[in-house]
Image (cartoon, coloured by chain):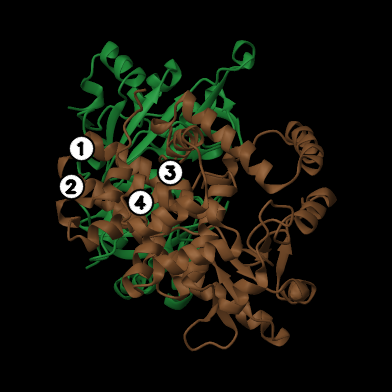
């Protein structure tokens, strides 16, 4: 089937691909990059490869503009984490930073050129009431429109409490107690993650997950949660994480595969290695690929189907890359994510409620008044 | 080639096909519309703006379309799309043009982070720029339109684009958005000026757009250095008064009302501080537009 032009992925894979782009291609690439939240990352890749000067001036200004925004958010995340650390200091509860915030605080390349929606952190489940209380006292609020059903849903069936927003800074924080939903078919032992975590330099109360766990968390999030608006961005996070960790530790790949089996996350790791390699050209040693394939028996037909779905879902989030087939793929992966998340006896009543509420609330385009001056 | 040089059929073809590549100051916007009211509005307000090759690069991608709902038959609407995605709720058809202008502002304000962008009108005379920050209702746009019709070059009625390298103001020179009574004030003040049909009952009341003077549009690549920061305040019946204003308070207020001050961190602080250092700051109260323009003229003729 003839898919429309994806100009973004080839550039992420190999920055020298920009050499063949004409002005009209840049017009599309900048839009694909922006919609996928990857324009700042493209800037970073091109700067590292010494190629920024080869970008025509007009698109280069967009890359620089988005890079400035990403750098601002990079600073903001550090400040937000500092605020959270101070807010929770009285509790003595250790804070485990997840995803973007962890990348930023440990100086990983996956933290650069990246846009952030929120700060994700994990605390022991037993500490949740205390953490919730201190954050509320410090000005963090739940969405006032959160209805009792949503609240119940978050607390009973997911791996986090409802998102909190700061009343002055309008920043968001997601407080987790583990990395997969309570009801999920895989059961990750959060204590194992905490025990392996590493302290952030110079800090006694801030931690990040161990390298292998960081990759596994990002992989389970991308391949099991059925949300692909930032799919390609998350895939490049994985590519950057694995490449950095492999360069620092010769044993990284074998540790990663062993850890996946310990945490029951072999299948997401299988997809992670497969699609990072297929889509972004990540160099994964053959041994690691063989080991994970042996642990996750995926038949030829199944593999063909998952390739079909994921290679479509992981295209840039832009209308130029959307087809009827990609719409169907996203829908199937969404259904799959729910199947992975909860058993049918919970899922069906949940979807039933969601469906009726969707009709009541209508769609979510912004009101013009917020944007005029 | 300017938009006004395109044959009507050619304009229609482009607006419904590859888009019209309209240059406004440092930006090129690819514009689509299937609405005659928009086509007329663009021809009226943007005739003097260059149209570039549609195979080139566009900074922004804006379309104004009629939503394909049943409602189009009894209560026609216009919808603004940015790169094929709906930005705002659809509005009544006759608000298409103001909505297009809001969309263009939105695009610059959210994406053009290569500039420090302040919420202010900017005009230039003898190579020196006046920056006029002010909240809605302060008479900023009216004063801006008045000055633009009396020898000042219009740079922008809404956003001051400031380069990070040298703190210069870059012209945008788009139409001036006038609200309610200021429409009547301006039609009396400048009988030769060109206005769009007023759009009524918008969330800002009645809105009309005044075409930017031709000279201002032509000097689209000509940045200039800021010399004054003036906070206008329209007060019915007030005596005209120009009073010095604290630089520290001005700095704080400008930072708070900027579109993207925080994006630039330390650099934004330095650029804004540089501007404050080189500008005289004033509070300006007025009720009579003629008199107000005179005060600005004498300001500009001072050494």
Q: Position of residue B296 (x, y in %)?
A: 34, 57
The residue most toward the front is: A294
Residue placed under numbered mark 4 in the picture: A39
Q: Residue at x 44, y 18 (%)?
A: B35
Residue placed under numbered mark 2 in the picture: A56
Indicate left or right for A143 with A98 as reference. right
Q: Are marks 1 and 2 in contact (CB under 8 Å)?
A: yes
Mark 2: secondary structure: loop
Q: Which chain is brown?
A: A
Point out the tag, 3 or 2, that comes first from the N-terminus: 3
Residue placed under numbered mark 1 in the picture: A23
Instruction: Choose top left, top right, bottom left or bottom right for residue B14.
Output: top left
Mark 4: secondary structure: helix
Residue placed under numbered mark 3 in the picture: A35
Spatial CA distance of label 1 from label 3 is 19 Å
Q: Position of residue B143 (x, y in %)?
A: 43, 49
């Amino acid at each position: 089937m003839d898919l429309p032009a994806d100009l973004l992925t080839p550039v992420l894979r190999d920055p020298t691909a920009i050499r063949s782009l004409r002005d009209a291609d840049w017009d599309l690439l900048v839009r694909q990059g922006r919609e996928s939240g990857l324009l700042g990352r493209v800037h970073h890749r091109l700067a590292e490869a010494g190629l920024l000067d080869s970008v025509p001036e007009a698109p280069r200004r967009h890359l620089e503009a988005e890079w400035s925004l990403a750098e601002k958010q990079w600073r903001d995340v550090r400040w937000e984490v500092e605020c959270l650390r101070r807010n929770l200091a009285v509790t003595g509860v250790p804070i485990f930073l997840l995803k973007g915030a962890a990348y930023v605080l440990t100086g990983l390349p996956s933290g650069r050129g990246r846009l952030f929606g929120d700060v994700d952190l994990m605390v022991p489940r037993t500490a949740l009431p205390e953490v919730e209380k201190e954050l509320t006292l410090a000005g963090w609020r739940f969405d006032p429109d959160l209805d009792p059903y949503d609240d119940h849903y978050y607390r009973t069936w997911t791996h986090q409490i409802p998102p909190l927003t700061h009343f002055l800074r309008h920043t968001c924080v997601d407080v987790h107690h583990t990395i997969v939903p309570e009801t999920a078919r895989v059961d990750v032992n959060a204590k194992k993650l905490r025990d392996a975590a590493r302290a952030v330099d110079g800090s006694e109360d801030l931690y990040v997950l161990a390298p292998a766990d960081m990759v596994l968390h990002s992989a389970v999030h991308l391949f099991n949660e059925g949300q692909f608006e930032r799919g390609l961005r998350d895939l490049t996070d994985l590519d950057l994480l694995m490449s950095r960790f492999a360069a620092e530790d010769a044993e990284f790949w074998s540790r990663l595969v062993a850890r996946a089996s310990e945490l029951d996350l072999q299948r997401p790791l299988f997809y992670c290695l497969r699609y990072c390699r297929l889509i972004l050209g990540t160099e994964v040693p053959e041994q690691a690929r063989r080991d994970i394939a042996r642990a996750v028996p995926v038949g030829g037909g199944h593999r063909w189907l998952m390739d079909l779905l994921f290679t479509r879902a992981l295209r840039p989030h832009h209308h130029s890359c959307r087809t009827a087939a990609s719409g169907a793929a996203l829908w199937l992966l969404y259904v799959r994510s729910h199947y992975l998340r909860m058993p049918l006896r919970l899922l069906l009543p949940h979807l039933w409620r969601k469906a009726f509420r969707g009709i009541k609330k209508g769609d979510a385009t912004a009101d013009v008044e917020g944007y005029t001056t | 080639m300017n938009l006004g040089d395109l044959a009507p059929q050619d304009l229609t073809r482009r607006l419904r096909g590859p888009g019209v590549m309209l240059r406004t100051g440092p930006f090129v916007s690819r514009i689509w519309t299937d609405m005659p009211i928009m086509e007329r509005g663009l021809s009226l307000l943007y005739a003097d703006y260059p149209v570039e090759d549609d195979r080139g690069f566009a900074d922004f991608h804006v379309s104004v379309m009629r939503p394909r709902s049943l409602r189009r038959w009894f209560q026609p609407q216009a919808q603004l799309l940015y790169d094929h995605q709906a930005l705002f709720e659809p509005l009544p058809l006759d608000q298409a043009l103001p909505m297009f202008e809001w969309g263009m502002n939105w695009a610059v304000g959210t994406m053009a982070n290569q500039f420090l962008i302040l919420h202010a009108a900017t005009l230039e005379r003898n190579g020196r720029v006046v920056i006029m920050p002010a909240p809605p209702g302060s008479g900023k746009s009216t004063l801006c339109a008045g000055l633009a019709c009396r020898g000042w070059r219009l740079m922008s009625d809404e956003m001051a684009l400031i380069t990070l390298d040298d703190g210069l103001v870059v012209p945008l020179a788009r139409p001036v958005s006038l609200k309610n009574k200021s429409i009547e004030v301006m039609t009396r003040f400048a009988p030769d000026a060109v206005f769009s049909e007023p759009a009524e009952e918008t969330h800002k009341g009645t809105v009309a757009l005044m075409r930017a003077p031709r000279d201002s549009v032509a000097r689209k690549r000509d940045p200039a250095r800021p010399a004054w920061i003036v906070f206008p305040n329209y007060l019915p019946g007030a005596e005209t008064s120009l009073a010095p204003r604290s630089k520290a308070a001005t700095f704080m207020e400008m930072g708070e009302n900027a579109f993207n001050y925080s994006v630039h961190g330390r650099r934004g602080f330095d650029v804004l501080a540089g501007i404050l250092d080189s500008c005289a700051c004033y509070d300006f109260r007025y009720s009579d537009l003629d008199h107000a323009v005179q005060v600005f003229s004498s300001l500009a003729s001072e050494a």
